[in-house]
Amino acid sequence: AFIAFRLAQARYAAAMQQPGVDVEKVQAAWLGELAGFVEKHPAAPDAAEAMLQLAIADEFAAREREALDRYAAITKNFPDSAPARQARGAARRLESVGKPLVLSGTTLDGKKVAVEAIKGVPVLVHYWATWCEPCKVDIAQIRELHAKYGPKRFGVVGICLDTDKQQLDRYLAAKPIPWAQLHESGGLDGPLAQELGVLTLPTMLLLDADGRVVERNLVITDLEKKLEAMLGAK
């Protein structure tokens, strides 16, 4: 099973590097190999990673029930594995709407911040990284809304998933951001990402004034109208 999984990974990587690659076709073949691997080797340690990749594909294809079922199977069958930590967080994120969000971390200057302690205003939780260009576009628009409404009416918590803290420090020195930035090592494999099974950047969640999740996959173009509905247009 160990060899079979790595051969499948190698075939996928090689196919993706071919000139003029048909990405959808290659990915479909890869998912087929993963499904076959899980069926043939359901108890192999690598089955957890294979199932995670299948669950991620389900989530991106809006097959959320299938994704949740796979995430549950990973946590049940491989409870102590790294994919299980990611799966638990992803399931929590998918089922978060209407529930309070409990999430805390340490800012770049060493302060502890608990998202659940910010009450009385809508709060945006923004997962980003300096290497993510769409994230920077988001930040520019979030900055405008933060200035428009002010921190007493609109709270923001940034969660930066850079693995290179020095690069992050240089970026923020050049372009300071006026809201708290949580950071821990590990990037997308670190604890802050795994808490909610964050798979891609940017990822944004919007909370109401009571700390309950109202949007778990917010896009920046919808943020202003959501805030206007929650706060009233000014």
Image: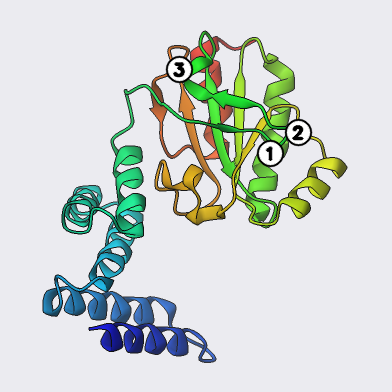
Name the residue that disc number 2 marks.
177
**Distance from Cα at disc 1 to Cα at disc 2:** 8 Å
Q: Are marks 1 and 2 in contact (CB under 8 Å)?
A: yes
Q: Amino acid at mark 1?
A: Ile
- Which of label 1 and label 2 is nearer to you? 2
Q: Secondary structure at mark 1?
A: helix
Q: Residue at x 62, y 11 (%)?
A: 153
Q: Residue at x 73, y 33 (%)?
A: 109
Left/right placement of residue 199 relative to residue 107 reads left
Q: Where is residue 166 drawn, in percent x and y?
A: 77, 53
Q: Earlier in the sequence, mark 1 or mark 2?
A: 1
Name the residue that disc number 3 marks.
208
**Residue furthest to the right:** 174
Residue nearest the observer in this picture, 221 or 198: 198
Q: Earlier in the sequence, mark 1 or mark 3?
A: 1
Residue 173 in the image: above or below residue 227: below
Left/right placement of residue 126 relative to residue 130 reads left
